[in-house]
Each structure stands twice: as structure tokens, then as C-alpha cells.
Amino acid sequence: MNVIQVEHIRKRFGNKDALADVSFSVPKGEIFGFLGPSGSGKTTLIKILTAQLNPTSGQASVFSQSAKRMHQSEQKMRFGILTDNSGLYERLTIEENLELYRKLYDLPKSSIDKVLHFVNLSGERKQKVSRLSKGMRQRIMLACAVIHEPELLFLDEPTSALDPVNSAHIYKGLHYLNENGTTIFLTTHDMAEAELMCNRVAILYQGQVQALGSPKELKKQHRENVVFVDLINGEAYELPLDEGTADQIADWMRRGLIDRLETKEPSLGDIFIKMTGSELL
Ligand SMILES: Nc1ncnc2c1ncn2[C@@H]1O[C@H](COP(=O)(O)OP(=O)(O)OP(=O)(O)O)[C@@H](O)[C@H]1O
């Protein structure tokens, strides 16, 4: 079953297409990465999927219903969202902010302890939000998005303000949620994060999906068909992957001349740059 279905979505702002023609689907249980350079329309699509914006044309559905219904309270219970503008009450403590969400979703008291552990902030629960660092705020916003363990989670750059230790902690928590049934739709500029987290990724550029597949499939598709050979006498070769090369390598091997033999697979970052012409941020 697809949790998200996007068909020929176009979104025009003024005389410019933010999204020109975007189609893809996300099956239940997947961690799906929506990648693209800054300004490519990732946030716009999340807004369409969560009924904050209407598309100019095309169909978007979530939980097999029009995405336009996502503002309805029974749908709101089913998803969580983390974006730049996820609001926090500055004068309240971390715990008091979470308490508001706990009541909203009618959850047991223990949900606060659980989610504080999830974002690695159990020790800071009594601190006022106004005094917190950017990374801590991001973790509390994430806590607010996941406290009800939603069926579907939208994460717009969830670890952009986090250090590697806290990012690793969050990845673990997100995998736990996913193993317990949460489908995750995330945007990121961090290709290592996409590779680590996502079952499949879409690369968005010029308003369209330019590549779609698992990181492994994409790497295979974009693999250079060359083999690198270093011989023990110091000679180094870059040869095409063909029959002639196979015979040559077999001969070198028989004569014990090979020091190193490898094929080169591109990273997801290399593929992103190739597809979008953009340098990574
Ligand atoms: N409300 C709006 N009115 C006019 N233009 C908009 C509006 N919202 C977004 N845009 C434009 O649409 C394009 C896509 O923006 P969007 O925020 O979706 O990109 P993004 O991929 O999420 O970028 P980033 O990675 O920097 O967050 C940009 O050119 C942006 O300026």
C-alpha cells in the first residue's frame, strides 16, 4: 500500500514553476529521501502533502485520500512534521512544551520520558526554550513531531543543526520508529545521511524527479565501467570493463603481477552533483 502518491504535481509561484511535473509514490514502511539543491522545491512539496499549499495542477494523496484533507483533525493525528517553522513556546520549558503536545494527542505521561530519551534531552527537561542552542531546539521540535509515534513522519532537514553524536542518536531513534511502522519522508542536503537512512531516494532538479531508486541501485546505474589496476612494478592502469581487459587481468594474475585491482562506485554525492550540476552545501 502506498502512503504517499504524487502524480504530475505542478506548483507555480508567479511566473515561475517551483515544481514542474513531479510523480512518485512512497509505500508504507519506507524511509524515503527527497533530495535536491536549495530552492528546488522540496519544502513546497511537503507543504502540498500536508495541506499547507494547493498544487497548481496534479494529484497528491496521503493515506489514500486527497492531501487537501491533511488539515482535518483525524488526519493530523496520523502524521508528524518537522520543518524550519515548527513553533515552540519560548517562555515554557522543554517539558512544558511537550506537555502541550501530550495533551493534544491524549497520550500517557510516560510518552514525555520516552520522547526525551529519543532526542537525548532527558537531563535538560526543566530548561526554558528561550535559553537553548539551535541544535537543542531542533531536537525538541523533532520530539514534538514524533511524540505520538505517527504513521507518517515528514522531516525537512532533521539534522541540519546537529553535531555528529546527536545526529547518530536521532538516526537510531528514527530507525526504531520505522521498525515500529512509521513511514518517513525526509529531505536532506547530507548525502551520507541519505545513504545511511533511506531505502529509496528521489533527486529533484528543475522541478522534476531526475533519479529515483535505492542508493545501491543508483550507484550501480551510475557506476563507471572501468577497472583500476596497479601492478607490482608501479605501473597503474585504468581499463574499460570488457573482454579484452578480462583477458589482460587474467594474464597479469597468472604471472603474479597485480598489486591492487578495483572498480570505482560513485557515492550518492557524486550522483547528486552529476544530476543537478550543484555543489553540495
Ligand atoms: N510562498 C512562496 N511564494 C513565492 N515563491 C515561493 C514560495 N515558496 C517557495 N517559493 C519559491 O519556490 C522555490 C522552491 O522553494 P522551496 O522552499 O520549496 O525549496 P527547497 O528545495 O525546500 O529549498 P531549501 O533546500 O533551501 O530549503 C524557490 O525558488 C522559492 O523561492
Image: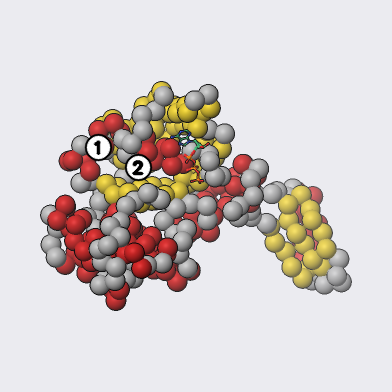
> Is residue 115 visible in this depiction of the protein?
no
User: Where residue 184 sits: x, y (%)?
Assistant: 36, 50
| Residue neighbourhood size for the residue with mark 2, other residues' Cα within 10 Å, grouped as few (<14), some (14–19), many (≥20) | few
Quarter assignment of residue 91? bottom left
Identify the image quadrant of residue 66.
Answer: top left
Q: Is residue 148 above or below residue 77?
A: below
The N terminus: image quadrant: top left
For the question of whether residue 46 can be seen, the reply is: yes
**Quick check: marks 1 and 2 in contact, CB under 8 Å?**
no
Image vertical order of residue 66 relative to residue 152, above or below: above
| Image position, residue 67 (x, y; %) | 30, 33
Question: Residue at the location (52% across, 36% down)?
Answer: 209
Residue closest to the eye, 152 or 224:
152
Q: Is residue 259 above or below residue 188?
A: below
Precedes in sequence: disc 1 or disc 2: 2
As drawn, the residue found furthest toward the bottom would be 123
Circle 2 SS class: strand
Identify the secondary structure beneath mark 1: helix
The type of residue carrying mark 2 is Pro
Q: Which residue is mark 1?
A: 71
145 relative position to 103: left or right = right
Residue at 19% across, 57% down: 100
In space, the residues marked 1 and 2 are separated at their CA atoms by: 21 Å
Return the x and y of residue 53 as percentages of the image width and height: 36, 33
Q: Nearer the viewer, residue 264 or 86?
A: 86
Q: Residues within 10 Å of mark 1 (few under 14, many from 20)?
A: few
Q: Is mark 1 within 8 Å of ligand 1?
A: no
| Residue type at tag 1 | His
Horizontally, residue 98 falls left or right of residue 216, namely left
Residue matched to label 2 = 27
* Residue 39 relative to residue 246: left or right: left
